[in-house]
Image (cartoon, grey):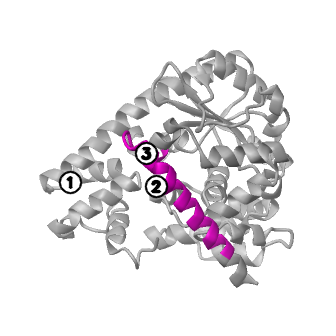
Amino acid sequence: MTLAANPRLRILCQLITDQLAFGSVPADQWPAVTDLAVQHSVAPLLYWLLKQQPLTLPPAPMATLALAAHNSAINQAILERARQQVQSAFEQAGIPCIWLKGAVLARTIYPEMGLRPMTDIDVLVPYDQRAAALQIAQTLGYEWEEGTGDFFPEADDELHGFSASKHHYRLYSRTQSGVALEIHYRLLGADDDRLMALEDLQWFWQTRQTLMMTDGKSLDHFSTEAQLLHLCAHIVLQHPGDDLFLIRYLDLHRLITRSALDWPTVIDQAVVLGWTFPVELALRRTVEFFATPLPDHVLTALVERRPAYEDIGLFRALQGSGGRWEAWRAYLVTLPPRQRLEMMRRALFPSRDYLRERYHVKTGIMLYYPYRWLDQSRVILTAVWQRLRAR
């Protein structure tokens, strides 16, 4: 996805960053722009900005944006109540926790919480307390959901040892509809040892800060510099491929333009982590989308100081339309043979509940199995072709 290939996307990017007057957008463009805003989870912010303009959209686009904003606000309230419940339980058990991504960003860099849509709440706990955190969450009513959660939870004795290659537990509340909780004990994916050594996680813990909210409650989070590094790595390494989700880059843009970042710290730590390529790539894309102002030296320094131990080959393999398969392949090789076969079976034949959530459908579920197989085949063939060309 590029701005040159989709001029309506450029319009959307400029609107949500106050670089284009709302009144300059032709009326016939608004339905497509609105659809893109919903697709990229920026509809609530677009609606909030629009309400401040002396402009009225055609009824259909206006109703679409209003519904997205309404749903996001309700969802935020539900997730915040769940977050506070989890935090309170962890505090009582003496388990430190740091909240990640949307849970923090919605409160710090957006005008209102509901303007940053979220699908789950993410929390980081110490690696050696991950099992205790999982047990506490389960006592609160969170459980694995077949097809959408972790296939091999640590509590499964038959598959003991598998979870050491994971980075989080994904759970669903059986008492609060639509609430998903991710308990992270590492920051990235199954190949975390190559992407970030466990000992490097300590630097992130050391940046821990506390945000005091208006209701008197607190929320611990990373420093701005650590947030930036994590967001860049999350975009490039955790969600590889060609599906560029605009809200993630908007998070970076707003973090950069609304914070006094210590750029030397960002660059130094990117070098230490071996993340100069992911950080550079994420920042370049952010600038492409939003013309984000960066200090002149930042991108140059990330290239010139790139360490020899940084695994550029792995990072490049994760990019492009074959990136999904490369990430999946790297994941599979970490598993023993039996678990590998079971994971492949579940990928090919997930539960119907998973298909409903993944493809946002309620009827005709069986038709989505062939669709899924065709889509997976396309990704694999693309990755194979890219490897052949690279040779």
| Of pointers 3 and 2, the one earlier in the residue sequence | 3
| Of pointers 2 and 1, the one earlier in the residue sequence | 1
Question: On the rendered structure, is 178 left or right of 283?
Answer: left
The front one of 186 and 314 is 314
- In the structure shown, which secondary structural element does the residue marked by tag 3 occupy? loop
Mark 1 vs mark 3, CA separation in Å: 19 Å
- Which amino acid does the dot numbered 1 rest on? Pro
Q: Residue at x 50, y 60 (%)?
A: 249
Number of the label disc, if any, that sits on residue 247: 2
The front one of 75 and 256 is 75
Judge whether residue 375 can be spotted in this image: yes
Mark 2 vs mark 1, CA separation in Å: 19 Å
For residue 113, which quarter of the picture?
top left
Residue 69 in the image: x percent, y percent? 31, 42
Number of the label disc, if any, that sits on residue 116: 3
Residue 130 in the image: x percent, y percent? 76, 30
- Magenta region: which residues? 358-384
For residue 321, which quarter of the picture?
bottom right
- Which amino acid does the dot numbered 3 rest on? Arg
Q: Residue at x 50, y 71 (%)?
A: 287
Number of the label disc, if any, that sits on residue 248: none
Judge whether residue 212 can be spotted in this image: no
Q: Residue at x 73, y 35 (%)?
A: 152
- In the structure shown, which secondary structural element does the residue marked by tag 1 occupy? helix
Residue 187 higher or lower than 318, as above or below = above
Mark 3 vs mark 2, CA separation in Å: 8 Å
- Which amino acid does the dot numbered 2 rest on? Ile
Q: Residue at x 48, y 68 (%)?
A: 292
Residue beneath disc 1: 61
Residue 167 higher or lower than 79, as above or below = below
